[in-house]
Image (tube, helix red, strand yellow):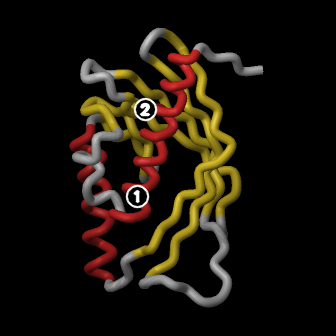
Amino acid sequence: MAKFTVEQAADVLAVKQAVYEWGDQLDIENGESISTCGCMSKEVQYFVGGEWRNGIDAVQAFYSGRIAAQREAGAVMCMRHFITNMKVSFTSDGHAKADFLLLFFAKAGDPPFVGYCEPIATADVWMECRREDDGHWRITRFDSKQIYIRG
């Protein structure tokens, strides 16, 4: 059973907020401002698109390239990342893990969508976060494994 001090409880909320801001950036902005939204450290390690991206600039390059390709194809995806069952634990002072289940939906076009839209993937996600010198918690590592993949 989890037991936190008052200070740790505030840190749990701050870690969760960083993760939720990450999801919001992907959902609302399609990752176009991921490098400036403040939820990730500059030296983040990030697994996406089947490979590791090291540093915020590499992560931004991935998302910028993806949205550019979608625009060129005329089919920008509307995405939603459902973050659930999050567990936050502290690995050391100023370092935390946030493990959760991610249910991912995406469909080309502009909402609202009528009719059925099934999830594209369900994944186990493991994030690491650090309280940085400015006092903000930021994501330092993102990894995931898809459990269910739409065929």
Quarter of the image that includes the C terminus:
bottom right
Vertical comparison of 40 with 84: above or below:
above
Q: Amino acid at mark 1?
A: Leu
The numbered mark, 1 or 2, whose residue comes first in the sequence reads 1
Q: Nearer the viewer, residue 45 or 105?
A: 105
Q: Residue furthest bottom?
A: 114
Query: According to the image, label 2 marks what residue?
Result: 141
Residue 89: quadrant of the picture: top right
* SS at badge 1: helix
Q: Indicate left or right for 110 with 5 as reference.
A: left
Residue 100 in percent (x, y) is at: 62, 40
Residue 62 in percent (x, y) is at: 30, 54
Q: Residue furthest right?
A: 1
Q: Amino acid at mark 2?
A: Arg
Vertical comparison of 110 with 29: above or below:
below
* SS at badge 2: strand
Q: Residue at x 65, y 88 (%)?
A: 115
Q: Nearer the viewer, mark 1 or mark 2?
A: 1
Residue 54: quadrant of the picture: top left
Question: Which mark identifies residue 56?
Answer: none
Circle 2 packing at 10 Å, graded few (<14), some (14-19), many (20+), is: many
Q: Residue furthest top?
A: 93
Q: Residue at x 60, y 44 (%)?
A: 145
Number of numbered labels in the structure image: 2
Query: According to the image, label 1 marks what residue?
Result: 26
Q: Residue at x 37, y 32 (%)?
A: 138
Quarter of the image that includes the N terminus:
top right
Cα distance in 3D space between marks 1 and 2: 16 Å
